[in-house]
Every structure is written in structure tokens, then in C-alpha cells.
Amino acid sequence: MDHLASTTPLITPDATVLRRIDAYPYRHRVRDVMKSPAKVVRPDLSLGEASALMTREQISSVFVARQTPAIPQETGIVTERDLLRAVASRGADALAVPVDALASRPLVAVAADAFIYRAIARMSRLKVRHLGVMDDHGKICGALSARDLLRVRAQETIAVDDEIEQADDAADLARAWARMPDVASALVREGVTARDVAAVISHEIAALTGGAARMAERRMRAEGRPPPCAFALAVLGSAGRGESLLALDQDNAVIFAGGEPGSDADLWFERFGSLTADILNEAGVPYCKGGVMAKNAPWRGSIVTWRSRIADWIRHSSARDLLSVDIFFDLLGVYGDLALAHELREHAFAAARGQIGFAKLLAEAAGPVEPALRFFGRFRTKQGRIDLKKAGLFGIVTSARVLAICHQIVERSTPARLAAVAQRGAGKVDLDALIDAHATFLDLILSQQIEDIAHGVPATNAVAVGRLDDKSRTRLRQALEQVQALDDLTRDLLFSA
């Protein structure tokens, strides 16, 4: 049979191999190559009818489910190879057999938003040639086959090492995560932009967080304490936006189906959040200095608690009361019942609709951009470096998020949010310039982080200006100039259509 189970592996290619790889799998996502919609057939369809359908549609598999939209756990698959084997063993009589008798279950699936390298990882590890593709709600929205990946020219040279999925403890996770700087460095050498590398890193942070949560739940089950109800663990901030680089810490929250603060359910998730945070810290992702972790009461709660919390945020009249609230709107579910996270984020955006005062307070809570230019465009440095997160990146990210909240733009990434605002016809030139500035800051920070790590220096967001060539200095100066008028631009766009 063709399929065994559905998992979420990590790929961590060896640096020496990555020097030779084609970067295509790290630039493109499954949705770029999948076939959609997937062909889902009823269980009683005969193999002969299925064969005719595959020939007519020029596809190599069909999914078998009793109802649509289908979910992977309740879906099987029959491939052309399965048909050939059946005919070879049973002759023409096989064509009358219902597909359900031959279907492999459950369907192995990958998210439509996943990078292609993850699909390659899954096919390679499980030795399958077909995958289902899931949308944000976990429903099957497409199909992916090995044939669809033929354009990925160098897949034979990719070292697929899904250590996170197979990890048994924090030490295993740490070994997997320790490879990430080499992966990032190799991708940069291949010409992959920092924005795309950040998306890859973010996917792995999500997988790492999910792996830590899986271990935490397993440990609690072993203690005789299974989850009291359905729940979802989510990442916030840069990981949710797909913009994480190599200097990062934990930002996560947990949403559960029911239970008041201080109840037995809440205490279960406090313990779960603490274990998850400890495992992540051991794996190399430090505790959040601001306390944005599911183990802390403000970052866990039932659906009812979270909805009440969101209502309180919107009613607040003080920016001081909204510290760290903004990153909640980057929320991305990574473990458990992901629909809970998805629905809560949708509710938050809906609740913030038209609340310009709330959006302004979020901008104020984030604080001002740290100036990095002196008179005549000279750089303002500390020990020869500029913290480009504080001086530029943070301001652009915050403004994009605030505008997204105000104008009901559900995109997660900063460039997508700014582009969506620009499409409304307001400030297009300035917003396009901010998108370019955002790319510049990411490029320079990532390059510095890779260099520092290679020299045994901890990764930070501070870039040594003296190491930059003239072209990079010019790019940096132009990018910093763009953020100088960021407050005025954001204020104007908050009131635009």
C-alpha cells in the first residue's frame, strides 16, 4: 500500500550538501505545484471506474472518502500502482472491486502553505509518491504526486533529515535546531532572499514548538493526566508572520475548549505550557523575556476567556495596558486542534473592525522607532553597530500590523499586509518603499547573524556598519530614511479608506 500515517517532519539539510542544492524547494510552496481540486470518490466506486477517471483526468491517484470536504484521518487513497497490482493478481475481476477495499489509510497530508522541501521530506521518509494537501482548516484541498515535483531539479541532492518529527526528547530537538544556521547560510549562498529564508526558519520554529508540545503532552499522559479538553498551541509574533531570523525567543499561547481561570483545566494547561517552554529552552529557543508563553496566565485561556480578554483589550484607554498584545494578531496554530486558533484569530480581527482608537493604542504601546541616522545621513552606531530591529524593522512590522487590524487585512506577513493596504489606493509609493526597506533590514540582519554565528558570536539584530560595502550602505541609509516618517504615514493610513 502507498500510505501509512500523517506527520509533520522537519528537514535539516547538512551544510556541505546544501552548497550544491537547487533552492527551488525553499522558495516555493506546495500550493504552487499541487493539483486542485483533489479528486475524491465514494468508497463504492469500482476500480474500473476509478481507472477510467484517472485516465480521463490524467492523474495518478484518487482519494476515497464518505463525504466532502474530507479530512486526511478519514480518507484513503488508491493509486495507479495499486490498480496495476490488483489487476496483476486478480485479472479483470479486479475492476469490479470497490476502491474502498484497496484504499490505504489514513491519507498522508501536507499543508498547502508548506514549503516544497517538506513534501519531499515526507515522501522520502515514508517512501510514498502521493500526498494529500490540506487548507488552513485541515480539509483536503489538493493532491501532490512525485510527478508534480519533477521540476524540483535537485531533489536527489537534498539531505532530508526530519529530526524534529522523530525527536524523543529535548536533546533530539536541540540537535535538529542546531543545524538551522547552516541551512540559512547555504540558502543565502544559493541566492535565496532573507525574506524567503525567514519563512523557512519560521516553519521550523513552528515545527519545533509543535514537537515540544507533543513531548509535553506525552509526559503528562504518562503521569496519568490526559488533556481535559480540545486545545491548540499557537506561535505569535515573527514565527506567526513567517519572518523569524536566527536571534529569537519563545512567543506562544494556548487556547482550550473550556475551563475558567484557576480551574482544573486551566491548571493542566499551566503545567503543559511550563513543560513546553522548558523543552523549547533546552532545545535552544530561550524563554520569552516578556513572558509571552502559554505557561503564564495572560497567554492561556479557554475560548470564552480569550474572547473576554480581546473585548477588554479593545476597551482599554491606555497603551501601557496593551504591551505585547499586538503580536497576538500574528497568531498561528501549530499543535492540537488548529481550528480553535484559526477561529480565535478571526474573532479578534472581527472584534477590532473599525476600532481606530484601539489600533492607535497598539502603535503607541510598541514605542517609537530608535533613530539611527544623524545629520547629513551619518549613521548613529553603538560600538560600531546598529540594532536594525529597533531602528527600522520593528517599526515597519508594527505599522503593517496596526493597519491590517484597522482595515481587516487577514494576511500575516508584513509585505503582504503593506501590499494589501497599497491596493486600496492610499500611499502606494510610500508603502512600496517600506516593503523594500523591510527586505533590506532582513537581508542585512540575516547576513550579520550568519557571519557572527560562524565566528562563535551569539546572533543579534545589531549590524556592523563597517563591514558593509558601498551598495549595502546606500541601501541601509535609504531604508532608515523611509522609517523616519513612519508615524505620520501610519496615522494618515489609519483614517484612509
Image (cartoon, rainbow, N blue to C red):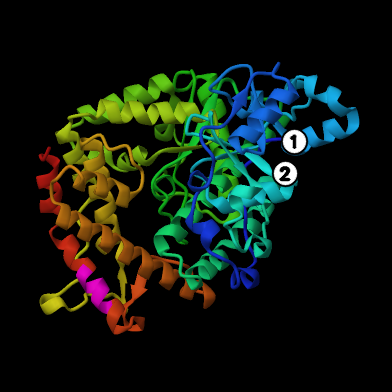
| Relative image position of residue 490 (x, y in whole percent) | 15, 48
| Relative image position of residue 193 (x, y in whole percent) | 41, 64
Question: 209 or 478: which is nearer to us?
Answer: 478
* Vertical arrangement, residue 14 with respect to residue 102, above or below: below
- The N terminus - image quarter: top right
Q: CA distance from mark 1 to mark 2?
A: 9 Å
Q: Is residue 211 visible?
A: yes
The residue lying at 63 percent from left, 23 percent from top is: 41
User: Which residue matches tag 2?
Assistant: 128
- What is the magenta segment's predominant secondary structure? helix
Query: Range of the magenta residues?
Result: 473-478
Of callouts 1 and 2, the N-terminal one: 1
The residue lying at 67 percent from left, 57 percent from top is: 160
Q: Quadrant of residue 94?
A: top right
Question: 407 or 355: which is nearer to us?
Answer: 407
- The total of numbered circles placed on residues is 2
The residue lying at 40 percent from left, 50 percent from top is: 238
Is 60 included in the stretch rendered in magenta?
Answer: no
| Relative image position of residue 341 (x, y in whole percent) | 45, 30
Amino acid on which the number 1 mark rests in the picture: Leu
Mark 1 or 2: the one toward you: 2
Evaluate if marks 1 and 2 touch, with contact meaning CB atoms under 8 Å apart.
Answer: yes
Question: 487 or 268: which is nearer to us?
Answer: 487
* Vertical arrangement, residue 22 with respect to residue 257, above or below: below
Q: Secondary structure at mark 2?
A: loop
- The C terminus - image quarter: top left
User: Which residue matches tag 1?
Assistant: 4
Amino acid on which the number 2 mark rests in the picture: Val
| Relative image position of residue 47 (x, y in whole percent) | 74, 25
The residue lying at 25 percent from left, 40 percent from top is: 404
Q: Secondary structure at mark 1?
A: loop
Is 474 included in the stretch rendered in magenta?
Answer: yes
